[in-house]
Image (tube, rainbow, N blue to C red):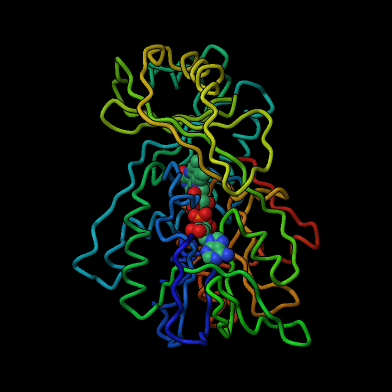
């Protein structure tokens, strides 16, 4: 039986459904806004976050996107991570973090995808990213461990692209938000009540039976976003998709950092430190799964992932799997991109959903933007309106050609 706790009050200016990286980012940026002195309640059904997407990630950021806005969103993530103490008001307890910029190495084995990499590089460079294209010979010279026999082009950026400590940022958002008065409660939002006109959510009902009046509601419920949206009678194209991860040690570790390598098969692998590496992938048939389905398919490694890795990096013939797990993407079936902003009719219901495989690095910009929109009614920094909910009805996908 899940434990629940009643909130201290019966009314809040903002109720956030889900307290993982997105909910906590929004909560912290709200608490950081000098023009906002309202009350914020974060309702989180599982404060261990055991099954959240946030706890299952690769914890990497990249600037290699095909949409300039996605590049800028990640650039803010890099700035935020590298300047965490400054963003947190020069709090001396906050650690200095860095990005382990081994880069993402996209590999193309055909002319069409090589063209996509070329087009992406132009967009990325124009947005200020340092993406470089590499011929197979250049790849081999810089990273002799790769087999590039089938490769026609690679693309990599080693500035602000690689591993970062998302757990530390997540912890500090929660800790600092709480210290500034944001209330986190273990409970589950199970229903919402709208006003007679259907234009406002008036209250949320919790699993404990408590009914909490709210000024605004934020859906930050990850792969369950569709369930939260249903509470106001809305459907969004988000579903849980299973993603598998493995950490393995190599008998003979590579002699330099392994970029987060995206093999043409879609399988990816990156440096994990100390002669270990982290790989990820999914099954060819990639259905929506049940919210509680974290079953590990052990044959996937032997039959699919490892053979691909050992072909791309022959030194990975001799490895030992140390740990493995499954996690869920909150997969936006329209375009695998964020769904943000207010609902078009239920005006005080906001979305932070559908981040698929790149939500961790988007959390600083998305939390900041959502707080701006909720407090000021407009974006003050990066304009995130292209991702707004209304693009779903208008069938306006933002096609991202650099998806993992
Ligand atoms: C294997 C894997 C690798 C990834 N790698 C990367 C990466 O390298 N870089 C990157 O940027 N992104 C990555 N991602 C994506 C990233 O992890 C997610 O986009 C991000 O964590 C989403 O955060 P979230 O807060 O929206 O959702 P979640 O972390 O899933 O959190 C949602 C929370 O809402 C709570 N909740 C749901 N419904 C309710 C309710 N009704 N009431 C109360 N609480 C509720 C849940 O308990 C949960 O804690 C990866 C994801 C996976 C699965």
Residue 365 screen position, x and y as percent:
49, 63
Of all residues, the one furthest to the left in this rendering is 92
Comparing 202 with 162, the one in front is: 202
Residue 185 in view in this figure: yes
Identify the residue shown where x is 30% and y is 20%.
Answer: 253
Residue 227 screen position, x and y as percent:
66, 61
Left or right of residue 330, residue 29 in this image: left
Comparing 6 with 234, the one in front is: 6
Left or right of residue 225, residue 298 in this image: left
Residue 129 in view in this figure: no
Comparing 337 with 170, the one in front is: 170
Number of disc labels: 0
Identify the residue shown where x is 24% and y is 56%.
Answer: 96
Question: Quarter-wise, where is residue 190 in the image?
Answer: bottom right
Identify the residue shown where x is 38% and y is 23%.
Answer: 321
Question: Quarter-wise, where is residue 21 in the image?
Answer: bottom left
Can you say whether 248 is above or below 332 in the image? above
Can you say whether 47 is above or below 165 in the image? below
Identify the residue shown where x is 39% and y is 77%.
Answer: 32
Of all residues, the one furthest to the right in this rendering is 394
Left or right of residue 238, residue 380 in this image: left
Residue 211 screen position, x and y as percent:
57, 82
Of all residues, the one furthest to the front in this rendering is 1
Can you say whether 109 is above or below 349 in the image? above
Looking at the rendering, in which quadrant would you find the C terminus? top right
Can you say whether 253 is above or below 62 in the image? above
Residue 313 screen position, x and y as percent:
43, 16
């Amino acid at each position: 039986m899940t434990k629940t706790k009643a909130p201290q009050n019966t009314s809040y200016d903002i109720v956030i459904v889900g307290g993982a990286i997105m909910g906590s980012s929004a909560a912290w940026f709200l608490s950081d806004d000098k023009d906002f002195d309202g009350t914020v309640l974060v309702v989180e059904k599982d404060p261990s976050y055991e099954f959240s997407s946030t706890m299952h990630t690769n914890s990497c950021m990249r600037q290699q996107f095909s949409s300039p806005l996605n590049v800028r969103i990640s650039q803010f993530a890099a700035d935020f991570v590298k300047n965490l103490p400054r963003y947190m008001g020069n709090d001396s307890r906050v650690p200095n973090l860095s990005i382990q910029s081994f880069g993402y190495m996209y590999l193309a084995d055909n002319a069409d995808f090589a063209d996509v990499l070329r087009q992406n590089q132009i967009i990325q460079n124009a947005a200020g990213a340092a993406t470089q294209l590499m011929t197979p010979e250049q790849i081999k010279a810089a990273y002799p461990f790769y087999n590039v026999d089938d490769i026609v082009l690679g693309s990599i950026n080693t500035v602000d692209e690689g591993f970062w400590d998302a757990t530390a940022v997540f912890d500090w958002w929660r800790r600092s938000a709480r210290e500034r008065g944001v209330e986190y409660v273990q409970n589950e939002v199970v229903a919402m009540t709208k006003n007679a006109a259907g234009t406002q959510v008036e209250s949320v009902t919790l699993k404990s039976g408590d009914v909490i009046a709210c000024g605004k509601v934020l859906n930050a419920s990850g792969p369950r976003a569709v369930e939260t949206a249903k509470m106001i009678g809305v459907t969004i194209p988000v579903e849980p998709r299973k993603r598998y991860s493995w950490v393995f040690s190599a008998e003979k570790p590579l002699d330099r950092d392994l970029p987060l390598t995206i093999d043409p098969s879609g399988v990816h692998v990156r440096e994990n430190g100390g002669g270990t590496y982290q790989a990820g992938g999914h099954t060819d048939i990639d259905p929506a799964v049940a919210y509680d389905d974290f079953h590990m398919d052990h044959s996937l490694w032997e039959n699919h992932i490892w053979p691909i890795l050992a072909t791309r990096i022959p030194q990975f013939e001799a490895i030992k799997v140390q740990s493995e797990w499954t996690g869920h993407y909150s997969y936006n079936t329209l375009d695998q991109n964020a769904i943000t902003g207010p609902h078009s009719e239920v005006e005080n219901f906001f979305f932070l959903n559908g981040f698929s495989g790149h939500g961790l690095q988007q959390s600083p910009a998305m939390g900041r933007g959502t707080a701006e929109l909720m407090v000021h009614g407009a974006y003050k920094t990066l304009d995130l309106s292209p991702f707004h909910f209304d693009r779903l009805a208008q069938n306006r996908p933002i096609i991202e050609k650099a998806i993992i």
